[in-house]
Amino acid sequence: MSAPTIDAMTRARAAAARESWAEAYGLLRAQDAHPSRALTGDDLTTLADAAWWSGRVDESVAARLRAHAAYVAGGDHRGAGLASWWLSYEYAALGRPAAASGWLHRAHHHLDDEPPCPEQCFLAWTDAETAAARGDRAAALAAARRMTALAVRSGSPDLLALSRQAEASVLLADGRRPEALALLDETMRAVTAGELSGMVTGRLYGLVLTRCMEAADLGRAVEWTNAAMEWCAPPWTGRPADPGAPPLPVSAPSGENPFRGVCRAHRVQVLDLLGAWALAEAEARQACREVPVDCLGSAAAAYYVAGDVQRRQGRLAEAAVSYAHAHDLGRIPQPGLALLRLAQGRAEAAVAGVDLALACLGDPRHDVLGRARLLAARSEVALAVHDLPGAAGAAAELELLAGDVPLLRATAGTARGAVALAEARPEPALRLLRRALAGWLELRVPYEAARVRMLLAAAGRAVGDEAAARAELTAARAVFERLGAVPDARRAAAAGGRRTPAARSG
C-alpha cells in the first residue's frame, strides 16, 4: 500500500481503538472502495463493528462474512472461529435461526481442535445457555465455569466480565441467589468503572438488567438502569485510546449510542413499578424508535409496559393495540392481556389466557418475576369467576416461589390476603395484607400499595373498623388519582362515597 493508504489505515485503526466508530467507519469504507486496497480479516472485523455502531446492521453482517473468508484464506482458525460465532449471534438476533445454527457449527469446526484460547469463551457461553434452556443446570454451570477459566487464562477484562454474567445467570436459575448476585455485583463494578469495551459494556447492561428484573431485584435494577442511561446519554463518547487520553466525540451518524433503546426499554420497566407512568409511556415510545433491528425484543418489552399503563388507566383500546404490537414482535403479552380481558368483562377469556401462558412458561426459576406475575394474575382472575380453590392454589404456589425476595414476598402476601378475604377470613387477611402493604411501601411501588389498601379497607369493614377502612380508601384514592388509574380511583371513590373523574377515551 502507498504511504497515504497506510496513514489512512493507521488513523482508522486508532479511531477504532478509542471507539470513535463513525470516524473508523468512514475511513475503512473509503479504503474498501478501492479494489487495490484489500482489507485484512482484522480490518474487515473492525469495519463490521464500526458499521454496527453506526446503525448499519446489514453492512455489519456483510463485512463479517468477508472477514471470515479472509481468515479462512489465511489459515487463521481462531479468527475464523470468532467471526463465525459473531455471525451466529447476529443471525439469531435477526430472527434467522437456521443461519445462526449453521454458523455456530462452523465456529465449532474452527475452534474445537485448537488449544485453549480466548475465542473458545464464546462457544462455552453458548454451551451454557443451550444447557440451561434444556434444563440441564449441571452442564450449564460446567460450561459457564469453563468459560470463566478460559477468560482468566486470557487476561481479558471483557471476557472475564462476560463469563461472570454467564455463571451468575446459571446460578440464578439453580436457585443460588446470593452467589449469583455477588457475581453480578462484581461484573457491574467493572462495567460502571469504565474498565470494559463499549460493545461489552452495552451487552452487559442489557444482560444484567434482564437478570435483575427476572430475579425481582428492584433495588439493583433501579441503580443499574440509572447507570446505563447515564452511559447512553448524548453526547455519547468513545473509549479513550489510553487512560490519560480525553474522550472523543462519537459514533453513529445520529450521534446516538445504539444500546440506548435497549437500556431505555429496561428503564421503562423500572419506571412502571415506581409509578412514573406518564414518563414510562413516553420512554416506551422513544425506546421503540431507538432499538436496533437486531434488538426488537426490547421494543416488545416496551410496548408491553405501555399496554399495562394504558390498561390501568382505563384506556383499554390503546392497551389492546400496545399488547398486539408486543405480540407481533414475539412477546406473549401476559398477564397484561388477561387482565385487560377481565377489565372488559371477559373473565373466562382472562382465565384461559393466563392458564395458557403459565403452561407455556419454561423453567420457573429462569424468570421468577415473570412467573410470579402470572400466578398473581391467575389468583386475581380466579377470584373474579368465584374459583376459590384455583385462586388459593395460585397464591400458595406464589408463596413457595417468593422465598425471601421482598418484591415477591409483597406479591405473594397480596394474593394470599385477597384469597383469605374472599374466604370470609378477615382477620388473617388483615395480617397478610398489612405485611404486604409494608413491603410495597418499602419498595416504593405505589400502585400495588394502593391496591392492597383497597383490600385492607374491605377487611377492616368486615371486622367492623369503619374508620380504618375509610382511611385506607382515602389513601388509595389519592394514589390512584395521582397515577391516573381512573378505574381504580372510581372504585375507591364509590367505596368511600365520593365521585371521581371519568376515564379517558381510548
Image: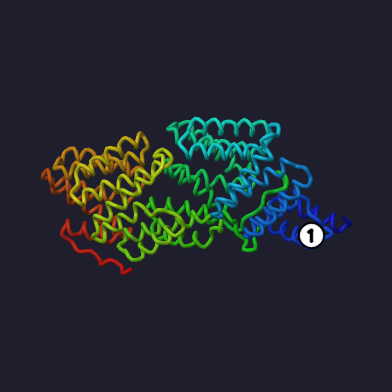
Which residue is at the front of the view, 83 or 43?
Answer: 83
Q: Against 126, is 21 above or below? A: below
Residue beneath label 1, please? 31
Residue 422 percent coordinates (x, y): 17, 45
Residue 425 percent coordinates (x, y): 15, 40
Name the residue type under label 1. Answer: Gln
Q: Residues within 10 Å of mark 1 (few under 14, many from 20)?
A: some
Residue occupying image coordinates x 68% and y 54%: 48
Residue 439 is left or right of residue 465, and the answer is: right
Which quadrant of the figure contains the N terminus? bottom right
Which residue is at the front of the view, 352 or 1?
Answer: 352
Residue occupying image coordinates x 47% and y 33%: 136
Q: Against 276, is 391 above or below? A: above
Q: In terms of image quadrants, where is residue 343?
A: bottom left
Q: Against 250, is 225 above or below? A: above
Residue 129 is left or right of residue 401, and the answer is: right
Residue occupying image coordinates x 46% and y 58%: 329
Residue 86 percent coordinates (x, y): 63, 47
